[in-house]
Amino acid sequence: MIGTDYVHAADRELDEAYEEPMGIDEYVDRLFERPSIGAHASKYLVSAIEAAGTRAVVEEGEERERYRFFDDPHNDGEHAILGNTEVLNDFVDDLRSIATGRGKDEKIIWFDGPTATGKSELKRCLINGLREYSKTPEGRRYTLEWNVASAEESPGLTYGDAPRVDEDSWYQSPVQSHPLSVFPEPVRQEIVDDLNAESGDQSPIRVETDLDPFCREAYDYLEKRYRRDDVPDLFSAVTDTRHLRVSNYVVDVGRGIGVLHSEDEGRPKERLVGSWMAGMLQKLDSRGRKNPQAFSYDGVLSQGNGLLTIVEDATQHADLLQKLLNVPDERHVKLDKGIGMDVDTQLLIISNPDLEAQLNQHADRNGTDPLKALKRRLDKHEFRYLTNLRLESELIHRELTGETSIWEGTDGDELRERVEAPLIVPVGEGGGRVVERELAPHTIEAAALYSVVTRLDSEDLPEGIGLVEKALLFDRGYLQEGDERLDADDVGLDATGDDGTHGVPVTFTRDVIADLLNGERDRTHPELSVENVIMPRDVLNEMANELHTAPMFSRAERREFEDRLVPVKNHVFERQEADVIGAIMHDKRVDEETVEEYVEHVYAWVTGETVTTARGERVEPDPLKMKVFEIEHLGRFGEDDYEGTTPNPPVTSFRRERVITALNRHAWRNRDEDFSIDEVNLLDIPVIRDVLESHDWEDVARVYDDLDPRQWDDPPANTETAAIKERTIENMSELFGYSPASAELTSRHVMGQVSYRWD
């Protein structure tokens, strides 16, 4: 693209977002054509969230529907909220109840949770999503503009000393007043009733606000002017397009979204609605009373009128919370004595857990607790640390790289590959030199798994289920070993109790990895840049070390988190071990045709059926083929397990319970009216694939008699160990994404452990 292309793109962006102003009658006609443009605050917020659609996710072992709005799709995912889907769904359900008027109208929505759980991302995600939705035809937002100077040669509402009757004389409502608020209440209600009756929406539109004080000043001025002149059709004269027009605006902070930041200061009324401007009060003196034109309207409720008001880090503004008590149900605030303003906004406060401590400081006083009324109004939604391995891996990846794309989908194998994948990070060094550092395969996975394990509740774990297994159940929804599958529902796990309420935050993990990326490692190799590789054990060891110096953790937490390190290390080692075995045995895998032939013969043998030959003949299953496969390819049995070709009970049990049971289970799950066993792609069945294609060290030793793991670091030339190592390093790179350097380090680590038990 060249410069003019960018300019034209900006033109299109503005053209799509803004419209020419219209008269109030034209707006009403458009409202009946597209009712969504007149939605009240909570209804508009629900519509914006729903407009982005949903997607399926697996969290805490359950498949859920997630609103894409919270993936920050309009901003390429930069401020996506990872996880906490159930909390966000409950939030939308509450909004829907508020929007429909079925309840919770008086509630202030409260998001609470530890640091680094996504609360700030929620604020940014809401701002981004609402801004972009307001640019769509369905999400247009409109307000009123007034021109009083056009009534006569008078300063009117202008802020200058001389009257002007041009574009500079138009003043928009400073608080985004709803266009229908200009109508007298009975007429306004009639419009709304007719609109809702025609649309048939389950969530009817409500417009329960009168003109804001600024607009009321303009309306009253014009009404008095025309009433004094005895002009007929007074409302038509006041709302003539010379004086009033409806214009659309793009929602943003200060225009439909009010955000009160932690550092904002001022008296309560200033922070809530704004302040009087002394100079303007003198200029716009209206016979001794305060003119609402002289008000700043820069408070959080004024900015958020029409849509959303956010109090960020509410602990810093606890003094305001009680003053917000009646805003949701009364929808009214005061600028001053006798000058009130109707408000239509969805109140949302965000805080860390210390706010709850403040709210509960008088809890032991029961009925005399002065904060009881406030606590009753707060509708709490608790953000927690992520307890899904995949989500935590994605979050760490985002923190290290700045990449914002969402890891979508529920396919276990695909997501597992992303979790286990290596990561290359460019790191700047002295003299402007950039070096690529590699986080070896399973390194991000190790950091994420340890982070998750520190956050899990260890109470009442089922027998045989440790914290690592619990983490895997939450991540996948099941545990699989061969054809044995254990579902989360069978175990009875659910995300309750203290899961996610404490533990290692992602910022701690990110900083540990960042320090490792920028540090030096005492590793050398004559040919490979092993000093630029960070291994899973490097990260885990450093996380454990940093626990003792990080001020965020108590002594009890440090001891607890340290105790949870060993099972994580063991799991990660098992994943590395599987990679090394898979790479060693890759060339010894059974071809698909042989596996299919074996399963077909076993199925026929168990069911008493025949098999079809390549020539189309129906023959009995071949006992010799099954025996050869089980001895030579599976390595599970020997000659002693057969009487000739007749299998003994252990072989019979294996065929029935390990092969056929898995096959039948898969067939039953995927059946339909026209289902036939011939349609099953046997290698697509994970349990059969695991049973028939997995290997262990006994298989390695059986196939490679002369392999010596003790020589792996520097095997003698022209030995079987040297040849196997060369092929293994190549296969690890091609199959699992290792670099030669990380494959060298990983295989050394694995073989070093295996050598102790090799003999």
Image (cartoon, rainbow, N blue to C red):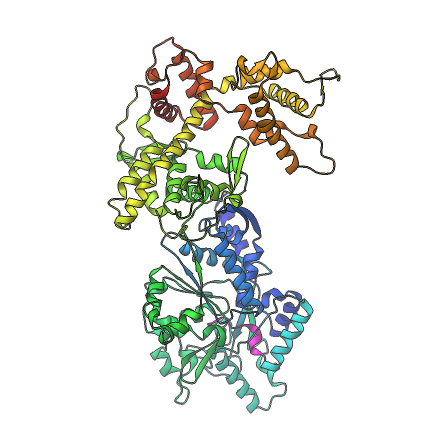
Relative height, residue 605 to residue 259 (above, below): above
Percent across and percent down for residue 432 are: 29, 35
The residue furthest left is 549
Q: Quadrant of residue 93?
A: bottom right
Of residues 257 and 739, the one nearer the viewer is 739
Relative height, residue 19 to residue 577 (above, below): below
Q: Residue at x 48, y 42 (%)?
A: 473
In this rendering, the count of numbered labels is 0
Percent across and percent down for residue 405 are: 48, 44
Residue 183 magenta-highlighted: yes
Of residues 318 and 249, the one nearer the viewer is 318
Q: Main secondary structure of the magenta part?
A: loop
Of residues 186 and 563, the one nearer the viewer is 563
Residue 108 shows up from this direction: yes
Q: Quadrant of residue 139?
A: bottom right
Q: Quadrant of residue 312?
A: bottom left
Please state the extent of the stretch shown in magenta in the rendering: 170-184
Of residues 370 and 513, the one nearer the viewer is 370
Q: Residue at x 63, y 71 (%)?
A: 26
Q: Residue at x 32, y 16 (%)?
A: 714
Residue 264 shows up from this direction: no
Percent across and percent down for residue 300 are: 41, 69
Relative height, residue 352 to residue 488 (above, below): below
**The C terminus lies in which quarter of the figure?**
top left
Relative height, residue 255 to residue 385 (above, below): below
Q: Using residue 455 as the reference point, say whether residue 632 is left or right of it.
A: right
Residue 693 magenta-highlighted: no
Q: Using residue 155 as the reference point, say whether residue 713 is left or right of it.
A: left
Percent across and percent down for residue 97 are: 55, 66
